[in-house]
Image (cartoon, coloured by chain):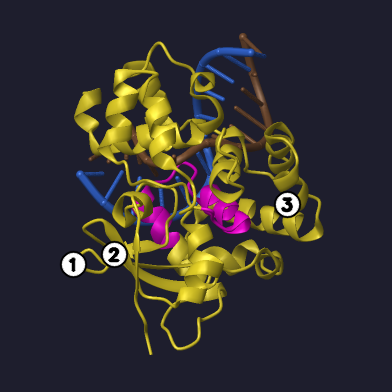
Chain colours: A yellow, B brown, C blue
Amino acid sequence: MSSYIEIPASFDPKQTLNCGQAFRWTEDGDGWWHGVARGRYLRLRRNEDTIIMECSQSELDSLWHDYLDLATDYAAIRRGLSQLDPVMKSAAEFAPGIHILRQDPWEALCSFIISQNNNIPRIQLIIERLCEMFGERISDSEFYNFPSAEKLATLTVDDLAPIKAGFRAKYMIDAARKVTTGEVDFAKVAAESVDFGRAELQKIVGVGPKVAECSLLYGFHKMECFPIDVWMKRAMSTLLPNLTPESFGEHAGIAQQYIFHYSRMHPELFE
DNA sequence: AACCAGGGTGATG
DNA sequence: CATCACCATGGT
């Protein structure tokens, strides 16, 4: 039934799927990672200089190649960023296998609404409960897809109580309703400038600058976006005091991801 | 027991 | 415009 594909890639599953940009991927032993994205289940692992993926060639071509952003030359982007600053260079070289995933825009928006004033393990738990309760089961599997905005728009805060999202539940529902009615226009966010996208997404109650920035970077693949959370604030003032978000240019989002991951993996730098 | 977690809102200077 | 309590929940 299941087939395997092996492809050459600098992309690294662990670095990419465990760096805080997506919340539905877990390691299931021996380097294998599994998760659900865009309504499909995938298992994959690194093997020397290749990636082994448990899927068909057509599914790789039509879905995972795009989701994992395999066509982008990250090495070239890394070379450019590394010239800016020695710390930037260290951060880029620490996890060179990071890619910025092309996640579903609604899933990214909703996930980062849940992320606010929260920690990553609990974000993952809340999202897992959300999917199990309100997502659809993927055929022949024990996994569920991320519930659509249309589905959440039919729910109330009380319906969401079991997932224990706390005060964020009302934000999720406001987002679902505005996205479903088109009051927040995803097609326009995708097509227009990032400044338009920032304003459009912040029409949602509970979406401020940071959540909007994450949504634009991870959901709409707007690579110049530069989310600043508590880790990035510390990193910029402590590690990169002579740089600003504008210093990083059109690929600032990738720089941000390198710096965020590097900082989280080296908390001793801030003691 | 107070503080923190990939923040945002609303009230107050 | 800057600051601040508060927001649910779970972990230290």
Magenta segment: A102-126
Residue A186 image label: 3
Label located before the other in sequence (1 or 2): 1
**Residue B3, x across and y down, in percent:** 32, 31
Residue occupying the point 54% across, 25% down: A249
Q: Where is residue A129 in the image (x, y as percent from the top left)?
A: 45, 68
Q: What amino acid is at disc 2?
A: Arg
Q: Mark 1 lies on which chain?
A: A
Please tell me whether residue A103 belongs to the stretch shown in magenta. yes
Q: Quadrant of residue B6?
A: top left
Residue corresponding to mark 2: A45
Which residue lies under the disc numbered 1?
Answer: A30
Q: In this view, does A85 lie to the left or right of A217?
A: left
Q: Tell me the CA gap for discs 3 and 2.
A: 33 Å
In this rendering, do the residues under marks 1 and 3 share a single chain? yes
Q: Is residue A246 visible?
A: yes
Bin the neighbour count of mark 2 within 10 Å (Cα to Cα): few under 14, some 14-19, many 20 and up. Answer: many
Question: Tag 3, which chain?
Answer: A
Front in this rendered view, residue A71 or A140: A71
Point out the tag, 3 or 2, that comes first from the N-terminus: 2
Along the line of sight, which residue is nearer the eye, A229 or A73? A73
Looking at the picture, which amino acid does disc 3 mark?
A: Phe
* Camera-nearest residue between A132 and A79: A79
Q: Which of marks 3 and 2 is in front?
A: 2
